[in-house]
Image (cartoon, rainbow, N blue to C red):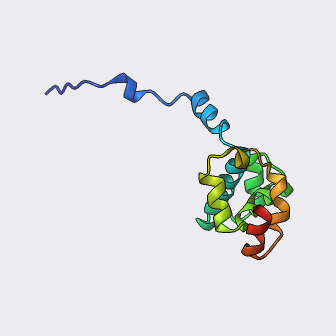
Amino acid sequence: MRIEFSIDPKKLRNTNRRKQMAGIAKEPSLRQNLILAYQIESILSEGRTKDLNEIAGWLNMGRTRLFQVTNLLLLAPSIQEEIIFAHNAIVEQIPEYKTREIVNEPLWESQRKLWS
């Protein structure tokens, strides 16, 4: 018995890694860091590791930097939503270090005032 079928080679090709990385690199760094923080949270909640030091090693990142990135999850949900979905020049130019004062504010209402 012989079975024949045709395959489109374009569908078999892997996505060009450079193109994929170029697409990611175009995203604002604050957005990249917030998404990374959610990925780290997911790894921890799934129980794939319980040690932030191990995650820091995987990412080739120091513990201090790792905590700075994961602290972005402490931002008010409305601020996080704006960082992830807004496509305006102001949000795209905000460096992560400028959000640290906002993250240290425990009340979301106060965070929104500082964000504005």
> Is residue 46 left or right of 11 when viewed as pictured?
right
**Vertical relation: 71 (above or below) 24:** below
In this view, which residue lies farthest toward the left?
A: 1
Which quarter of the figure is the C terminus placed in?
bottom right
- For residue 48, say whether it is visible: no
Q: Measuring from the top left, give residue 15's x and y in whole percent.
A: 50, 31
Q: Nearer the viewer, residue 59 or 103?
A: 103
Residue 114, quarter of picture = bottom right
Q: Residue at x 58, y 33 (%)?
A: 20
What residue do we see at 20% from left, 24% from top? 4
> Relative to 88, does residue 107 appear above or below in the rendering?
below
20 left or right of 53? left
In the image, residue 51 lies at what x, y percent?
74, 63
Q: Is residue 116 visible?
A: yes
- Residue at the image point whose x is 84% and y is 55% from the top: 98
> Which quadrant, please, contains the N terminus?
top left
Q: In the rendered image, which quarter is residue 79 located in?
A: bottom right
Quadrant of residue 89 within the rendered picture: top right
Q: In the picture shown, does residue 6 fall above or below 39?
A: above
Count of picture labels: 0
x and y percent of residue 102 in the render?
A: 81, 65
Q: Give how far across and how far down residue 93 sits, in percent.
A: 76, 44
68 or 80: nearer the viewer: 80
Q: Residue at x 32, y 24 (%)?
A: 8
